[in-house]
Image (cartoon, grey):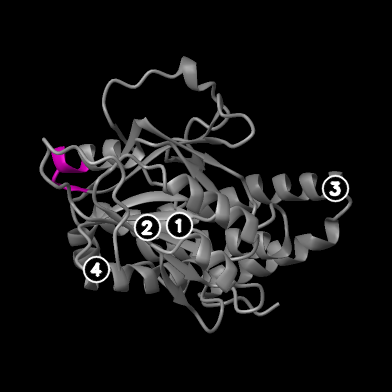
Amino acid sequence: MDEFLISPDPKTARRPLVYIIILHYNRISDTVLTLESVQSLQYDNFRVLLVDNDPTHGITREILSQFPQVEFQKNSENLGYAGGNNIGIRIAIARGAEFLLILNNDVIVETDILTELVRVMEKNELCAACQPIVVYNDRDDYIWSAGTEFYFGYPRLYLKNKERSKVIFHDPVKIFGLVGCALLMRGAAVRDIGMFDEDLFLMHEETDWCIRAKKRGYGLFVVDTAIVRHKISASLVMFSKQYLYYVSRNWLLVAGKHFPLSTYFYVLATEFFLRFPYYVIHLAQQKKTRLIQYYLKGVIDGISGISGKGDF
């Protein structure tokens, strides 16, 4: 399969091979826009692997014909974020990828992000992964995520809703965790740490992976010179039953897996006294209070250690 070769610099040696893994699920039009933006990347050694995780509304031959250089993997069922991306990661590593860019199918990339992300990774050999600044697609002067911070028992999006022009970074930022919509992973680190935990299925897989990376002595960075635009909740609707279930269950599973008992009880307390009222209020405003049952089911299953694809 041929590579994308975009504006190579003949004076520069070939850069490390990066595999861009785009996981498609729902909203083909968004996937097309993501693929189009990737074609404009100013990096001389990358390949694109499109993983179709949608057995009912998947990628058509007509779509593939628009992007003949894209490598394609069709999954027979929805394997979730973790399982779907792991399929792509296995293929990419087997084909010699030194770095893996995990990219949601509702993300639009700036032309220089690979150059900037790889530059930081090459300067910091103990960095397992990094991410760009993620801004809102329709408000690109405002930050959606500069990684995550541990805030009142939860991995809150760092600098969310801050005006980008007013935030000053002096170096790549060390952070609690990274978000999975645009995540550059070092292939060697993945071989050492392992891939995403497929028991989580959907949500907080990247948080779990980041915690595992830090336990093994790796660093995580946010690179402020790289920018992507994100259509928030295009694939997973905010406050849907799936969101409410997985967001509560999986964070409790991750906390129970990694934290000492005292921290786990702190997480539980903040879940009941902070996040539960938050979801009740927002669902009441939308006249959807019946959906709180899915949040509570997620909490119960998280405490009980029930994992995998949710049964609801």
Q: Quarter of the image for the N terminus: give it.
A: bottom left
The CA span between labels 1 and 2 is: 6 Å
Nearer the viewer's eye, disc 1 or disc 3?
Answer: 3
Residue 154 appears in the picture as rendered:
no
Q: Which sits earlier in the primary sequence, circle 1 or circle 4? A: 4
- Residue 259 - label: 2
For image coordinates 48% across by 78% down, the residue present is 74
Q: What residue type is labelled 4?
A: Ile
The residue at which mark 4 appears reads as 93
Q: In the picture provided, is 127 more to the left or to the right than 77?
A: left
Residue 6 appears in the picture as rendered:
yes
The CA span between labels 1 and 4 is: 35 Å
Q: Is mark 1 on a helix, strand or loop?
A: helix
160 falls in the magenta region: no
Q: Is mark 3 on a helix, strand or loop?
A: loop
Q: Which sits earlier in the primary sequence, circle 4 or circle 2? A: 4
Circle 1 Cα neighbour tier, 10 Å, few/some/many (<14 / 14–19 / ≥20): some
The residue at which mark 3 appears reads as 286
Q: Which sits earlier in the primary sequence, circle 3 or circle 4? A: 4
For image coordinates 69% across by 62% down, the residue present is 295
Q: What residue type is labelled 2?
A: Phe
Q: Which amino acid does label 1 sit on?
A: Tyr
Residue 129 % position (x, y): 28, 49
- Residue 159 - label: none
Q: Disc 1 vs disc 2: Cβ atoms closer than 8 Å?
A: yes
Looking at the rendering, the stretch of residues picked out in magenta corresponds to 121-127
Nearer the viewer's eye, disc 1 or disc 4?
Answer: 4
